[in-house]
Image (spheres, rainbow, N blue to C red):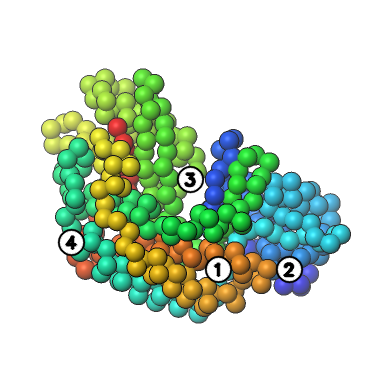
Amino acid sequence: MNEKGQLAINPIKFNKIRFLGKMGSDWISIEYRLSKLLTQNVLYASYHEPKTIEEIADLLWLSKNHVENEIDYLEYNGFMDRIDKNKYISKILIHDLSNEVVNERKKIFEHYANLVCEKYNLFHNNKLPFTNNIYTPNDDQNFLLYSIISICCAYKFENPCFQQMIKKHLIKRNDGSENIPFTYLDNEQKPYVELNLSLKATNGKLFKIFITNSIYDNRSFDWSQIFQKEFIDLYDFISSPDDKNTTNLNNLMKKGYLVEHEQNKPLVNLVTSELDLDDIVALLPDFPKDFIELNNSLGDELFNISKSCYPKHIHDLCYTYYKNSLFSGEMIINIIDNLISNGILKPLEDFQKNTVNMILFL
C-alpha cells in the first residue's frame, strides 16, 4: 500500500473499536478516541509497516503538518510508536481478513460451537438450574435462557491462562488505562459486546446491570450507555412502581424497557434478579477441563488460517488473542445459532429484542 493518495480515494473505516484490558479513570472509551476517519486512516497507513510522516501524508493526500498533528496525538496516547528516527508504526490489532479466510473461519467456529454445545451440560436442554428470585417477563424461560447463556459464555468460557498471556501486550496510557485496541474492517456483523455496569439509584442505592449487545437485539450499541439515565429511571420504577414520573415513564416505554399490559399497568420488559451476578455464575455448570485444550486447538486453527492477513510484527499478539476464541463474540453467536437450530432456544418476539441479554440486578 504505497500508491500516492490511495487512502484519500478509498479510505478505510473501522467497524466498531473494542479493546482488551481496562479503561482509564476518565472513562473516555477507545472508540471515542479513535472515532475520526482521519485517525483511523493514519493508523491503517502505518499498520503493516513503519512509515514516515511524508509517506503517510502521501497516502492520505494531505499536508505534512496536518498528518503530523494527528501522529502527535496518537503517539501521546500510546496508539503509535516512533521507531528509528523518523518512522512510525501503529499499536492496534486490525482484523483485515480476506473473504476466503472469513469463510474458513465460519466453518471452524460452527464446528467448535457444535462441540461446545455437546459437551456443556447447560446446553443439553432448556431447563435452568435456578428460577427463584429471578423475574422474567411473562415467565418466559426462553427469554431468560438467552441472558443466562450470555452470562455463561462471558464468565465460564474464558481461557483461565488468557489474562496472564495477554498482559505483556497491554499498553499503559496516560489516562491510567491499560489495554490493546482491536477492530475489524468488514461491516457484515454487529459485534457482540458485553457491559457490566454499576450505577447509583436516586435513593443512593447501588445496583448493577449486565448487558450484551449483539445481532440478536435491535439496540444501537453506544458507549454512552455507560451514562444513560434510563437505567436509573427503570430501577426507580421497579422499586416504586406507584411513584410515576410521566416523562420518565414515556422514555422507558419508548426504549422498550416497559411495555403495555392488558391490566393497563406497564410490564417490566427485561430480566431482573435478586441474586447477584456472582451467585448466578456460581450456579452454572463448571468449565469442563477439556475445554482448555478445546480453546487451545481452536486458537491454533484460527491463527494458522488467518496469520497471512496480519503483519509479521503483530503475529505474537494475534497468536495470544486467538487463544481465547472460545470466549469470543463470534463463538457466542455460533453457540446461540446452534441452540436455535437444535430447538433449545426459540427465536425472539420483536418486542423482546429491545431488552434481550439484559439483566438488572436489584
Name the residue carrying label 4.
125
Q: Tell us which disc is closer to us: 1 or 3.
A: 1
* Of callouts 3 and 4, the N-terminal one: 4
Name the residue carrying label 2.
49
> Label 1, label 3: how many angstroms apart (C-alpha)?
29 Å
- Is there any visible trace of residue 30 in the rendered image? yes
Task: Give how far across and how far down residue 122 sits, in percent.
Answer: 23, 58
* Of callouts 1 and 2, the N-terminal one: 2
Q: Tell us which disc is closer to us: 1 or 2.
A: 1
Tell whether 6 sits left or right of 63.
left
Q: Quadrant of the C terminus?
A: top left
Q: Residues within 10 Å of mark 4 (few under 14, many from 20)?
A: few
Tell whether 235 sits left or right of 300.
left
Q: Quadrant of the N terminus?
A: bottom right
Q: Tell us which disc is closer to us: 4 or 1.
A: 1
Q: Residues within 10 Å of mark 3 (few under 14, many from 20)?
A: few
Q: Residues within 10 Å of mark 2 (few under 14, many from 20)?
A: some
Q: Tell us which disc is closer to us: 2 or 4.
A: 4
Q: Residue at x 31, y 47 (%)?
A: 281
Name the residue carrying label 3.
222
Look at the numbered discs 1 and 3 and tell me whether their residues touch, using CB distance below 8 Å. Answer: no
Name the residue carrying label 1.
319
Nearest to the observer: residue 2 or residue 164: 164
> Label 1, label 2: how many angstroms apart (C-alpha)?
19 Å
